[in-house]
Image (spheres, grey):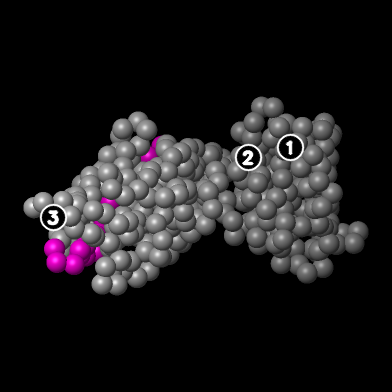
Amino acid sequence: MAQRRGYVLIALAGILGLSILGAPLPAGAAPAKSTIARPTHLRPVQSKADCVAVLSLLAAICDSAVKQGDLQLIWDESDKAVTGYKVFRVDGGGHQLLGTVTKRYFLVKKPSEGYANLCFAVQALAGKQTSADSPRYCYAPGATATTRSFKASFTQTQVAWSASKVDCGSGPFPASAFFQAADKEGAFTAFFPPLRNERPTSGSIGVLGVYAGAEAALLSLQQHADIFGYKQFCSGNYKGTNPSVQVNALAGMAFDLGELARHKFYSAALTLESVQTLVYTSGKFTLQGGGWCAVHVGAATREWRLSPLGNMTYSKRGLVTLSSHPQPGIDVSPIVSVWASQRYAAAYGFIVAGLLQPGPNPPTSEACLTKYASPSLKVVYF
C-alpha cells in the first residue's frame, strides 16, 4: 500500500508540476520586494468544493488525499500574470523550499514527526519576478481529515403484507395457507393469517434486524378439498381472478453521529452486506426462485425507532437506487451532508426499501426479500 501511494504521489507531481523533496534544503533568504501581488488566504483543503475549485478534472486526486489524511494547501491569487508558485516551509526562522507548482494547490508529504508545529508560505512567479510571501499558514488540529466507521445503533424492519380476494365459486377458499419465513439463525420469523376469507386482507408486523425487498405469490394452483363430504374443485383463476399474496419489507438503520456535530463533514459511505434471501412458503404454495432485488436507500423523515409501523418513510432528496448487489461503500454523502448542516438534529437514519410491483396483482411469483448483516457507515470529517 505504501509503495502504491508513492506511485500516486509521483504521478501527482508530474501532473501538477509538483516537486516533493526527500531531504530538506538549506534555509534561504526571503526574496526582494516585487510588484507582483502576493498570494492570499493560504489554507488547507477541507471540502469537495476546494478540490474542484483548484484541480477541476483532477479533483479525484485531491479527494483521495483527503481520505488518506494528507495535508493539502490551496490559496487565492489576484494577479493574472502569475505563471507558477513556490511553496515554502517557514517555521524555524527560514525559507525551506518544498516545491514549485503551476496550480494553486500543493500536497504536503507528511514527515515522520507529523504535521504539528509546521508553518507554510507561498510566493507567486511571473517571468523573472517573484512576489513577497503570502500570509503564513500554521498547521492546526482538524486541518487533515479523520475517517471513522460507525455501527448501526438500532435497526428495525416493517413487513407489510396483503392478500387479494380468494374465491372458489360458491364458497371461500377451502384450505388455509399460512405463509411464513425464517432466516437461518431464526432471528426473523413472520406468520400471516390463513387465506380463507372472501374479502381482501392486509396487515403489518415489526421485526428486529435489516430486511428489505418484496415477495409475490400467485395462488393459481388447483386444489381439491373435502367439505362436508363433498369433493370441491378450486382454482385460483376461477372467474378470471388471480388470487395473490404480496409481502414488502423496508428497514430502518440509525447511527449515533451526535459527537460529530462540532466537526466539518466531508463524505459518508454506507456498507450493506446482503447475506440471505428469504422465501415465504406454506403447506399449499411455494414461492419460486429467490434472489436479490433492487432497493432504495433514503433518509428517514420520521422518528421510527419507538413506533416503526407506518413511520418508515424516506425523502427523495439524495435517494440512492441499488439495481445490483450493494458494493462496499455506497456513497450517501448527499444524505449525511443534510444532517451535518442541521447538526444532526433531524438525523433519523436511513431507510432501505424494497420496490413494489405496480398494480393489484404481481405478474409472476418471485422472491427477493433480502437480509442485510452488520450495516456500517464510514464518515470522513475534519
- 2 and 3 marks in contact (CB < 8 Å): no
Residue 282 vertical placement versus 25 (above, below): below
Q: Which circle, 1 or 3, is nearer the viewer?
A: 3
Left or right relative to 111: residue 201: left
Which one is earlier in the sequence, the residue at label 2 or at label 1?
Answer: 1
Depth check: 145 or 226 in front? Answer: 226
Left or right relative to 292: residue 137: right
Which one is earlier in the sequence, the residue at label 2 or at label 3?
Answer: 2
**Which residue is labeled 2 in the image?**
68
Q: Which circle marks residue 230 in the picture?
A: 3
Please state the horizontal and vertical placement of residue 11, each as a whole percent of the image. Answer: 81, 46
Residue situated furthest right in the rendering: 128
**Which residue is labeled 1 in the image?**
5
The residues colored magenta run: 151-171
Residue situated furthest top in the rendering: 113
Q: Amino acid at mark 2?
A: Gln
